[in-house]
Image (cartoon, coloured by chain):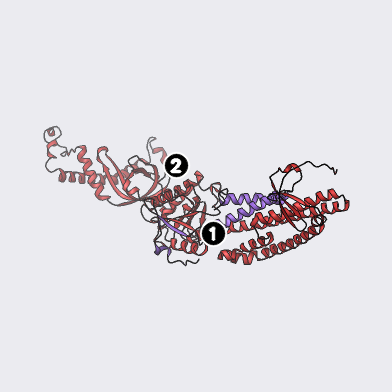
Chain colours: A purple, B red
Amino acid sequence: MSDTSIKDFEAALAELDLLVKKLEDGDLSLEQSLALYERGVQLSRFCHTKLEEAERRVEILTERGELKPAPASLVGDDPERR
Amino acid sequence: MPSHFGLPFDDEPDQPPAASKAVPAAPTSPSLEARVRDIARRTLGSTPAAPVAPAAPIEPAAPRRQVLSVSELTAAIRDQLEAQFFTVWVEGELSNAKIWNNGHLYFTLKDDRSQLKGVMFRTQLRYLKFKPVDGLRVIARGRVSVYEARGEYQLTCEMLEPKGLGALQLAFEQLKKRLQAEGLFDEARKRPLPALPRKIGIVTSLDGAAIRDMLKVLGRRYHNAHLVIRSTRVQGDGSAAEIAQAIRAIQHVPGVDVLIVGRGGGSVEDLWAFNEEPVARAIAECPVPVISAVGHESDVTIADFVADRRAPTPSAAAEIVVSSRDEFCHRIDRMRDRLDAAMMGRVQALSRRVHVLGGRTALAGFPTRLAMRGRDVTELAHRLDQQFRMRLSGRERTLTLLRRRLDAFDLGRRLDGIRTRLATADGRLRAAVIRRHDRAQAGLRERAGRLTSLSPLAVLGRGYAVAWNADRTHALRHATDVVPGDRIRVTLADGELECDVRGTAPRLTTND
C-alpha cells in the first residue's frame, strides 16, 4: 500500500465517514473540498484494495507454535475459483 | 367408671407395650453376639482361652466369658461389614461436602433420621461432572469400609449421581449459574467482530466435518481469507484442557483478530468439552473476539454463553465472518456514493457563485473590476480544470473518472456474493445514483459552458492576459509575487506563454 498514513480499515472508514460529513455540511472552499474529496477517494480506494490484495492462505498452527501450510487434503477439495 | 379407682396412680399404661417391644429385639442380640464370637474364634484360633483361665473361680456359675481386644472386635466388625456391604446403592442428601487438599471428597449423606460418612477418592472424583454441593440429593454407589484406627465406618463412594436430574445436566446448570454470577455472560462483555479480519483463527479438530464445512463456505464466499487453524481433540477425557490450550496458543498469532471455536454435531457427551470450565475461561479471557460454533442449531453449550457471538453451526460461523466482510464492502460503497454526491454539490454551488459574481460584474461594467472578476473566474475555472482533473487522476476527466469508479464499485464484478445482493437490493439505489450522477454531469457541463461564454475568454479576447506562477496554481496579483528570474505563465485568449521575469516594478497607475 502506497499510502502509509492509512493505518487500518476501521480507521479508514471512520475518517471517510468524517470527511463525507464535513463535505456535506460545511461551506468549504473549492480547494478544501477538493482536498477532502481527494482524501476520500484515497481512503475508499485503500479499503477496496485492501479487500482484494490478500491471498487466500490456510495455515496450521502446530503444537510447537509453528505455522505451516495446511495439507492439500484439507484445502484441496474445495472449489478454488479465481 | 369405678374401675379407675382400682388403678394405682403411678401405674404407667405405656410400660407393658414398651417392655414387650424390647422383647423381640432381644433374640437378635444373642445371635449377633454368637456370630461375632464365632468369627472371633475362627479368626483368633486358640487365643480366646487365655483371658478366661485365672479369674474364673469367683463366679463359677457364669458362662465362660469371651473377652476380645478392641482390635479384634473391630477387625471382626470390619470383615463383617465389608463383606456384607461390598456394593451398595444409597440415597441421601449431601452435607459437609468438601474437597480436601489431598484431592479427596469427604461428605456426609443423611436422611431425616441417620447420617453416613462418606469419601470419594481423587481418582473417582475426576470423572464427576457436577459439583457436589451441600443440600443436593444424590444416589451414591460404593462399599462400606471400616477405619479401624478410629472405629468408624464410612461409605467409600465410587460413583455419585444427582437424584432426578442427569449428572451432565446438573453440571451444566451449576457451571452456567456460577459463570453467570461472575458476569461472564453479560451483554456488555460481548465485543464486536472486526469489520475485516486480517486472519481468522480456527480451533477445532482437523478430522471433523466442522473444519471442512467452514473451509467450504470461506472458499466459496471469501476467496482471499487468511486462515490459521489450531487442531485439537474436541471430545474425550482431557479434551477441554486441550481446547483451552489451543485457544490460548492461537490468540498470540500476529494478525489473528477473530476466533472460531467449535466442532460438528454429536451426542451431549461428545459436545461435553464445550460445557467445561477450562474452555469457558479460555474464551472469556481471549483478547480477540470469539465465535462459538458447537454442534447443531439446537445444541447450546456454556461456550456459547461466554463467546462474543454464538453461531448455530460451524458453517454459520464462517458465514458470519463472510457477512461482516460483505457489510464492510457495503459501508465503503455507501460512503463513496455520498462522497461523490457531496463533492458534486460543492462544485455546483461554487460554480453558481462564480456565475453570479461574473454576471454582476459584467453588468457593473468597470473594466478593472471586470478584469479582477475575470481573473477570479479564470482562476476558479482553471483550478477546476487543473486540480479537479489533474490532481485526481491526471488526464482523465473527473466525471469520467467518477463514472469509472462507480463502475469499479460494481461489486458484482468483484465478488460473487455481493453481486447477487447488489443486483436485487441495491439495483434501484444504484440506478438512482447513476441518474443523479448523470444529472450532475449535465449540470456541470452546462455551467462550464456558461462560464466560458461569460467572461474570462471574452476578456482575454479583448487583450487581457492572466499571469500565473510557474506551476499555475496561483494567478499573480502583485508585482511582488515574483522576483526576477522566476518563471511565470501567461494565459492569452488563444494560448499560453511561458515567460521568465526579467524585472519587476510597482504599478504606477491606480484603479480604485
> Which corner quadrant holds the C terminus of chain B?
top right
Q: Residue at x 63, y 51 (%)?
A: A39
- Reply above or below: B252 against B234: above
Q: Secondary structure at mark 2?
A: loop
Are there few (<14), some (14-19), or many (20+) residues within 10 Å of tag 2? few
Where is residue B399 shown, x and y percent of the image?
69, 61
Asked if the residues shown at circle 2 and circle 1 are in contact, with their CB atoms under 8 angstroms apart, the answer is no
Q: Is residue B315 left or right of residue B51?
A: right
Q: Quadrant of residue B344?
A: bottom right
Chain ID, mark 1: A
Q: Which residue is mark 1?
A: A52
Residue density around tag 1, few if under 14, some if 14–19, many if 20 or more, within 10 Å: some
Q: Is residue B61 above or below residue B249?
A: above
Residue placed most toward the observer, B68 or A25? A25
Q: Which residue corresponds to mark 2?
A: B1
Q: Residue B30: where, in percent of width, then height?
A: 23, 44
Residue A25 in the figure: left or right of residue B125: right
Q: Position of residue B339 (x, y in %)?
A: 67, 55
Q: Secondary structure at mark 1?
A: helix
Asked if residue B164 can be seen in this view, the reply is: no
Q: Quadrant of the N terminus of chain B?
A: top left
Q: Residue at x 15, y 34 (%)?
A: B59
Quadrant of res B229:
bottom left
User: Are the residues flagged by discs 2 and 1 from a single subunit?
Assistant: no
Please state which amino acid type lies under the numbered disc 1.
Glu
Which residue type carries mark 2?
Met
Nearer the observer, A26 or B150: A26
